[in-house]
Amino acid sequence: MLRASERPAVAPVVWGTVPDLADAVTITGPGPYFAQQGRAVLGWALREAPAICHRIVEAAGVTMADIDVFVPHQANLRMIEPLAESLGLREDAVIADDVITSGNTSAATIPLAISRMREAGRIPAGATALLIGFGGGFSWAGQVVRLP
């Protein structure tokens, strides 16, 4: 349930596109078939996503020290671990790693990771989470939310 509070439960969305990577993640038919240029996507995530994460946190009016949970797109651990490390999160911050269990489930990675972490008792209600996803076309978006 959303309700007014001094500290909003849903912060503004920060989003954008990367025209130079428009062909890096595609879905083609007749399947449809998913294809990506993994090295290009990984390179972008490690070079550009840290600054974007800081913009997302700033737009929410919080700091990295306020982030309890980091839930990036669950592409692979080679992306998630160095990205999380580069952010300067608190040592006790929980980092989503559902990719280990579920693999890259495309648009479902963030909600699935949150659900699995909640079921496992890894994150409490009210935790402040930094979310960032990216994919087809090459678009990205993120926000800070307080988990129910």
Image (spheres, helix red, strand yellow):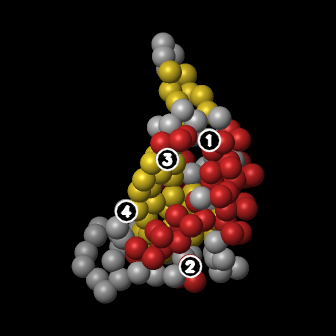
Q: Name the residue type under label 4.
A: Val
Secondary structure beneath disc 4? loop
Spatial CA span between label 4 and label 1: 23 Å
Spatial CA span between label 1 and label 3: 21 Å
The mark lying in front, picked from 4 and 1, is 4
Q: Residue 77 carries which label?
A: none
Q: Are marks 1 and 2 in contact (CB under 8 Å)?
A: no
Residue carrying label 2: 64
Chain-order first, disc 4 or disc 1: 4
Chain-order first, disc 3 or disc 2: 3
Q: Can residue 123 be seen in this view?
A: no
Crowd around label 2: few <14 · some 14–19 · many ≥20 (10 Å): some
Spatial CA span between label 4 and label 3: 17 Å
Q: Name the residue type under label 1.
A: Asn
The mark lying in front, picked from 1 and 2, is 2
Locate residue 46, reporting x and y percent.
Answer: 67, 57
Residue carrying label 3: 18
Residue carrying label 1: 104
Residue located farthest toward the top when viewing the structure as drawn: 30
Residue at image position (55%, 22%) is 33
Chain-order first, disc 1 or disc 3: 3
Chain-order first, disc 1 or disc 2: 2
The mark lying in front, picked from 3 and 2, is 3
